[in-house]
Amino acid sequence: MKTILTGLRVNSELHLGHYLGVIKKLVALSNRYSKTGYEINLFIPDLHSIITPVDDDLQTNTLKNIKYFLASGLELNDHVHIYRQSRVPAHAELAWVLNCFATTGELSRMTQYKDKSAGKTSVGVGIFDYPVLMAADILLYDAEYVPVGEDQFQHLELTRTLAERFNHRYGETFTLPLAPKQQVEFMNLEAGVRIRDLVNPEKKMSKSTPAENSKIMLSDSPEQVKKKIMSATTDSFGEIDFDFKTRPGISNLLVIESLLKDEPLETTLSRWRGTTRYGDLKASVAGTLAAFLSNLQSKAAEIPDADVLAIFPEGEAYANNLANQKLTKVYEKLGLR
Ligand code: AMP
């Protein structure tokens, strides 16, 4: 059984970067591989959500975000398993076991931890330890394929290290996920997109940027979209061209237009390159985006909560079954059973 595993975070409201960078790609991946002999584990990492204080209602966000996936064309079939991490207790249990195989030195070297703890004398243990929980998320299902962004490569390597360490000591127990480079090759992730901040296009669009005009939320109205896109930072070259290094603002708008229209960037570019029609390009992007979001929002709104809640029983039964088998095997090897 070949398993592709990926988590869908529900901490915050989703923006356009999440849609184009994650949702669109995961939906295509799931629809393709669930029909070609793979099991797709799409889980809600709600235990990861609580490593920092949660402002939003996780239950509401879970439903809302799954609706966006369904509205984006995620096809449900017997090989797609959607489950909430906190409903599969083996995740937390295996994380404890793996904690006993990880070292503080290893976890201290994680760049995410270093970034989040920089300048602080003390941080939450969850922030320090979540890579171990992530290892448990993956190893419980022998998932070889874990489509993650570059920011998670180090954690994937840690997962491999912990699995190897356990296997070495107790015999073959865990399947190692593929190394990051192979993950990228397998899933063609190098075609990764980074949608930029509309006000400061040197940076990626991010939920943590306070300026409202800097990001397009999936819940934005056509008026909001228009206002934000029309005021987006471009450049003073006076002629439209594509180059993320020298003209990130206009390049970002061209990428958004091409991805939403599902056309090659070259095709989009050929309509605008060399012209001075910055305003027209913005109006075009605003129109494409507003139409896209209205469609997505109305599709999501048509999905009743009950339909989303009805998805979990299968996914959670499937996950608990596999995860408990693996956990029992681990406990047996450790002499706990
Ligand atoms: P975050 O909400 O920042 O934790 O990101 C969750 C996921 O969305 C990660 O896999 C990010 O790589 C992806 N993501 C976040 N912002 C963007 C963006 N502006 N463009 C593309 N992908 C993004």
Image (spheres, grey):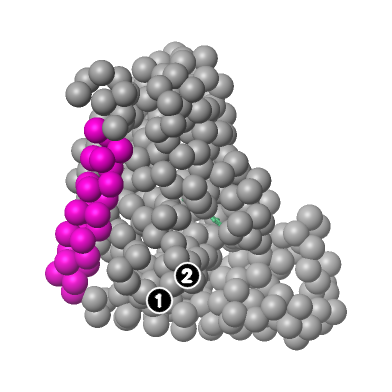
Left or right of residue 258, residue 38 in this image:
left
Range covered by the magenta-colored residues? 304-328
Q: CA distance from mark 1 to mark 2?
A: 18 Å
What kind of element bears circle 2?
Answer: loop
**285 is within the stretch colored magenta:** no
Disc with the residue nearer the chain's start (1 vs 2): 2
Front residue of 139/325: it is: 325
Mark 1 C-beta to ligand 1 under 8 Å: no
The numbered dot on residue 156 is none
**91 versus 118 height, above or below:** below
Identify the residue position indicated by label 1 in the image.
73
Front residue of 50/293: it is: 50
What percent of the width, then of the height, locates residue 183? 59, 50
Q: Quadrant of the C terminus?
A: top left
By secondary structure, the bulk of the magenta-drawn segment is best described as helix
What percent of the width, then of the height, locates residue 165? 48, 23
Q: Quadrant of the N terminus?
A: bottom left
